Image (cartoon, rainbow, N blue to C red):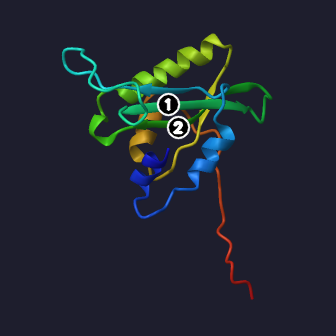
Amino acid sequence: MQRTYQHLFPEQDFAHLARTVEQYFSRDTPLWWVDFLGETGEKIASSSPHSSVACLWVGNAIDQVQGDRHAHIFLLYVEPEHRRRGIGTALMQYIENWATQRGDRQIGLQVFQSNQAALNLYNQLGYQTQSLWMVKSLNSNKQ
């Protein structure tokens, strides 16, 4: 999680994300790691998160209109040198099958507006904007 945010915002410190993981990671929020396979199919990396080239972390959300539980993607990350090789698409297809098998009727996710590569992927896969998350910075020096 820290690596994906660090890639988007290199000047920012993301040590606080450990609390997010501690709060939300459980057996109900599966996490899949992708190891790199060479051209001949031999395994090059071990099944350790430190040597993997991609990951997908999924949780649950409640549709605010219908009230149905559905899969929510907390994180999809592919190492920069392994992008544009179909790994992200394969992970998204995997999660669609997984969610369908457990009876979900939709998958939700949040994406930064500045992450054009991710927006392109999700649009290409048929995801549509359903709502916008809006924020307002508050001045801490109130007068």
Q: Between 35 and 104, which is closer to the camera in this rendering?
A: 35
The 10 Å Cα crowd at callout 1, few under 14, some 14 to 19, many 20 or more, is many
What's under tag 2, amino acid-wise? Leu
Looking at the image, which residue is at 41% across and 22% down? 90
Q: Which residue is mark 1?
A: 56
In this view of the protein, can residue 123 be seen by the observer? no
Q: Is residue 64 above or below residue 107?
A: below
Whether residue 72 is situated above or below residue 9 in the rendered picture = above
- Amino acid tagged 1: Leu
Kindly indicate whether the residue at mark 1 contacts the one at mark 2 (C-beta within 8 angstroms).
Answer: yes
| Most foreground residue, 45 or 77 | 45
Q: Residue furthest bottom?
A: 143
Disc on the earlier residue, 2 or 1: 1
> Can residue 119 be spotted in the picture?
yes
Marks 2 and 1 sit apart, C-alpha to C-alpha, by 6 Å
- Left or right side of 17 for 6: left
Q: Quadrant of residue 128?
A: top right
| Residue at the spot of label 2 | 75
Left or right: 21 in relation to 68: left
User: Seen in the image, is 68 located left or right of residue 98?
Assistant: right
Residue occupying the far left of the picture: 40
Element on which disc 1 rests: strand
Measuring 41% from the left and 38% from the top, which residue is drawn there? Answer: 120
How far across and how far down the image is residue 19, in percent? 63, 49
